[in-house]
Amino acid sequence: MSSLHPFDTAVALQPQADGTFIGHTSPAYANMVGPFGGVTAAQALSAVLLHPQRLGDPISLTVNFAAALADGPFTVTARPARTNRSTQHWVIEMQQNGETVLTGMAFFGLRRDTWGADEHAMPEVPAAGDITRASGPARVEWVKRYEMRFAEGAIPVERNGADAGISRTRLWLRDDPPRPLDFASLTALSDVFFPRVWRRRPVLVPIGTVSMTVYYHADAALLQATDSGYLLGQSQAQAFRNGYFDQTAQLWNESGNLLVTTHQVVYYKE
C-alpha cells in the first residue's frame, strides 16, 4: 500500500522526453462529473513547479476549464513564455485524447522583503474545535478528502428555491488526513467552496466553473509555518446574471495571515 497522501498521489506527474508531463485523474478526488476542479488546477500548477526552468514561486495562476476530464491519463505542457530577472510568465495546456481540456497562465517570481499589510482582515468566527464537522454528499468522493467545519452558510438542507438574500459561506477547512500546506494543496483548497448559486437560491441547478484565478499572498516560509493547521475560508458571489455568476474567496491561516484570494466565473443553467 502506498504511504503517499492521496493528494500527492493525485497531483503526481511523470516528466517525458519531449518536456511534457503525464498525469492521471484520481478516483479519490472524483466529482459528480469528472474530477474536482481544484485538483485539476493543482495538477496544472505542478507542471510548472516541477519544470527545470522554473524561477521563484507562484504569484498568480489562471486556469480555464475547456472541458471536463474523463477518467484516465492526460498530458500537461508548461512553457515559459518570458523570463525576466525576477519574474516569469508561463503558458499551460492540458490535453486528453488529443483534445485541449484546460488552458492556463501562471506568473512566478522571486519575492523581496518589503513593507506589507493585510487590508482584508480575517472574520471573527468560533474556533474550529467548537464547530461540528460537516458531512458532504455521499456520492461526491472529493469532499471526503477535506475536513470542513461551517461557521456560516453551509449547503442548504431544504432546496425550496427561496432566495436566501446572501451567498456568503465561512468555514474552517484542511486536508483529510492533515497534510503540510504547499502551493499545490493551497490551490486545490481554494476551490472547495460549493457554487454560490446553491447557497443564494437553494436549487441544484447544473453548474460548471469556466475560469478560476488564484492569487498567492503567502510565500514558502508562511506555508511552512502554517503546516497542517486549519484555514479559515470565506466565499461570496457578486452577481448572478444571464447564466453566469462570479464568486470570490479568501483563505487565512489560524494566525490571521491572508494566504490566498481567488476569483472564478461559473456557468449555471435554469
Image: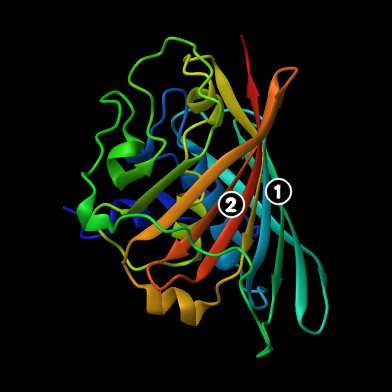
Earlier along the polypeptide chain: callout 2 or callout 1? 2
Residue at 75% in and 17% down: 242
Residue at 43% in and 46% down: 170
Which corner quadrant of the image does residue 207 belong to? top right
111 to the left or right of 160: right
218 versus 233 height, above or below: below
Badge 1 crowding class, 10 Å Cα cut-off, few under 14, some 14 to 19, many 20 or more, is many
251 to the left or right of 213: left
136 to the left or right of 87: left
Farthest residue toward the bottom?
Answer: 113
Residue at 33% in and 61% down: 230
What residue type is disc 2 on? Ala
Q: Where is residue 78 in the image (x, y as percent from the top left)?
A: 68, 57
Q: Which residue position is annotated with label 1?
A: 104
| Coloration mode | rainbow
Q: Is residue 99 visible?
A: no
What residue type is disc 1 on? Gly
Q: Which residue position is annotated with label 2?
A: 44
| Mark 2 in CB contact with mark 1 (< 8 angstroms) | yes
Query: CA gap, disc 2 to disc 1?
Result: 8 Å
Q: Position of residue 269 (x, y in %)?
A: 62, 13
Residue at 70% in and 18% down: 243
